[in-house]
Structure formats: structure tokens, C-alpha cells
Image (cartoon, rainbow, N blue to C red):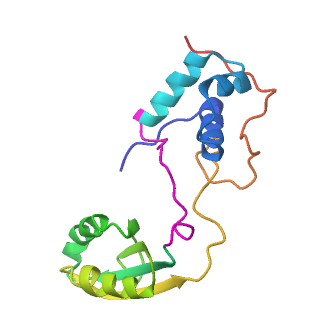
Amino acid sequence: MADQVELDKTDIYLLNTLSNNGRKSFTDLAQDLNVSVGMVRNRYKRLVDEGVLHIIGWTDPVKSGMNSYARIVMKIRPTELIRSVAEELVTIDEVSFVALTTGMYDLEINVTCQNNSDLLKLMHSRIHTIEGVYETSTTMYMEILKWASHKVTSLGAVSETVKPNGFAMTDTIEDEH
């Protein structure tokens, strides 16, 4: 597992602000923080290079015609195949999330398909045919009320109480040169 990256108030502000508005300019961010544009650019580059910040274009599956969204948990036998099954699942376009888990099941995935017929085809032709998939249990998501997102705190934990910008403007930040 990758080493945890130490984050300070500036990093946290940048992460939370860019999570809310990924198009906010370095100039505007620098003005918000009362620091140089160069400092913001350097922090941004470091956060991307260290794998903390990922820049993506997110498409709402429902609005783009993907109306069948499900969570599938799996038992893998023999258990030595867990990693290879997970690696195979990662290659499937309809799979948006893959995790090794504890408990009754070995893997959890999320899949998005246009409709239930496509989901059934995916299960029968692509997932159940993977060597080692022993048992699956599917939970259909009927309505998504919140998509994955979180605020970063100084401890790197998830917090619902962080202010929208994650930073008090009265805090001072030393400019990097």
C-alpha cells in the first residue's frame, strides 16, 4: 500500500476547493489563499504527482443513459485466485469500482449498464465465466441519492463538518518560493 502523504491546510484547501470546482483557476486559488500563483501551481503538481489528487471528468450514469447500477459481492475459490479475478474485473468497461474485502465475500464491485438485460448479459458472459468466481450476490441500486465524494481534514479523515472551502481565511499560510 502507498505511503500516506502529509497534508497541511493549504493542501486541504486546494483538495476540497478543486473537489467542488475542478475548473477554478490557479489565480483565483492563489487570491483565496493570499499566496503566489507559483505556490498554488507547485502544490497542485505535487498533489497530482503523489497520487493524492486525480483529475477526471465524471459523467452522471443516469443522465447518460446507464439505468442499471448494481453492487456485486463475490466469493472466489480457490482464494489464491482473488487477485487475478480482481485484475480481470478491472478490465471490464462496465465495472467502475473493484475492492478486496473482508467478511463473507472476497471482492466487491460496482457495475453500470444501460438496462437490466445488459446487466444480465454482463453477469453471464463476462463475470461468471472468470475462473475462480464461485458465488455472487447482486444488490440493485434503485435511486442514487449521493455519489462518492468527501472532504479532507487535517488528519486525512472524512468529515461532513468541514466548511465548503475547508479553510478559514483568517489562517495564515507561508508562501513557498
Which sits in the foreground, 118 or 5?
A: 118
The residue depicted at 78 percent of the width and 33 percent of the height is: 168
Asked if 30 appears above or below 3 in the picture, the reply is: above
Residue 52 location in percent, x, y? 47, 41
Residue 129 location in percent, x, y? 21, 83
> Position of 81 compared to 136: left or right?
left
Name which quarter of the figure residue 135 lies in.
bottom left
> Position of 159 compared to 85: left or right?
right
Which sits in the foreground, 21 or 160?
A: 21
Q: Quadrant of the C terminus?
A: top right
Q: Main secondary structure of the magenta part?
A: loop
Which sits in the foreground, 163 or 36?
A: 36
Residue span colored magenta: 49-65
> Position of 65 compared to 88: left or right?
right
Name which quarter of the figure residue 110 lies in.
bottom left
The residue depicted at 67 percent of the width and 18 percent of the height is: 35
The residue depicted at 68 percent of the width and 53 percent of the height is: 159
Residue 76 location in percent, x, y? 27, 81
Residue 1 location in percent, x, y? 35, 50
Residue 1 part of the magenta-drawn span:
no
Asked if 128 appears above or below 50 in the picture, the reply is: below
How many numbered marks appear? 0
> Position of 91 compared to 70: left or right?
left
Asked if 53 appears above or below 172 in the picture, the reply is: below
Hey, which residue is sitting farthest top in the picture? Answer: 177
